[in-house]
Amino acid sequence: MPRSPEQYEAMRAATRERVWSAAVRVFARQGYAATNMRRIAAEAGISTGLIYRHAATKEELFADLVTRAAEGLGTVAERFRDARRPGETLRAFTEEFVGDLSGDGEYAEFHRLVHQAFAQGLQEGDGASAAVRTLVERRDELLRATVELIRCGQRSGGFRAGDPRELADCYFAMLDGLVTMRFGLGEGFCVPGVDTLTGFLAEGEHDG
């Protein structure tokens, strides 16, 4: 029996997800410069011809992934801006981060790809692709939203005193470091718990 248009679309969507997952792994492990479409196709288990039905170039595929990342950062920034309970909001986000990082390693690989895009954006500035420039803008938005979230938490007595920007930078530096260790050590890395990761922000933890 011939497949229906819906079945063909479902198959195409499934292949597209395989291509994106494979691209994340290859970009993360080999770097942008050393990656090519043939290697991504092999990682996805499809022919080189088939991969070009989903992206014309590795630049287009990289831009698709970077756009996904930018949308994710924008969503988190909006969530932080709309928060009414700063401590609960940051803890919930940290729990999600820990859960994702404890998975099969693809989350860490995706973050490594995002770091490559950040570095590309900082190096190339206005010459970077539109997707990379948007990613950098969303990253800056998230940082500003986190600073304000911490400031609100300080006013309500839930977070320790200190420069909100410094505390926000420390928080994200810690998460970035965990991603790097998870990528390098694989399943041998022990992902810390939420209390460990957020404890330095708690009011009273650093008294005396």
Image (cartoon, rainbow, N blue to C red):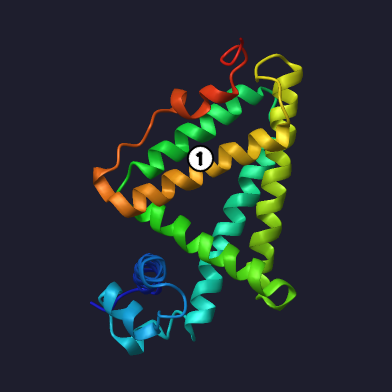
Q: Going by the picture, which residue comes out furthest to the bottom?
A: 49
Give the residue type that dot 1 points to: Met
> 22 or 17: nearer the eye?
22
Q: Nearer the viewer, residue 19 or 187?
A: 187
- Can you tell which quarter of the image residue 184 is in? bottom left
Looking at the rendered structure, the secondary structure element under dot 1 is helix
Q: Residue at x 71, y 25 (%)?
A: 162
Q: How many marks?
A: 1
Residue 164 is situated, as x and y percent measured from the top left of the image, at 72, 32
**Residue at horizontal 69%, vertical 42%?**
78
Identify the residue shown where x is 52% and y is 30%: 92
Kindly tell me whether residue 44 is visible in this rendering.
yes
Asked if residue 206 is positioned above or below residue 141 in the image, the reply reads: above
- Residue 60 is left or right of residue 128, and the answer is left
Q: Is residue 181 above or below residue 35?
A: above
Relative to 131, residue 194 above or below: above
Residue 82 seen in render: no
> Dot 1, how many residues are within 10 Å of its Cα: few (below 14), some (14-19), or many (20+)?
few
Above or below, 140 against 93 in this view is below
On the image, the x and y values in percent for residue 73 come to 61, 50
* Rendered-image quadrant of the C terminus: top right
The quadrant of the rendering that contains the N terminus is bottom left
On the image, the x and y values in percent for residue 80 come to 67, 36
Question: Horizontally, is 54 left or right of 118 in the view?
Answer: left
Could you say which quadrant of the image residue 138 lies in?
A: bottom right
Q: Locate residue 51, reporting x and y percent.
A: 38, 82
**Mark 1 — residue?**
174
Q: Is residue 66 left or right of residue 54?
A: right
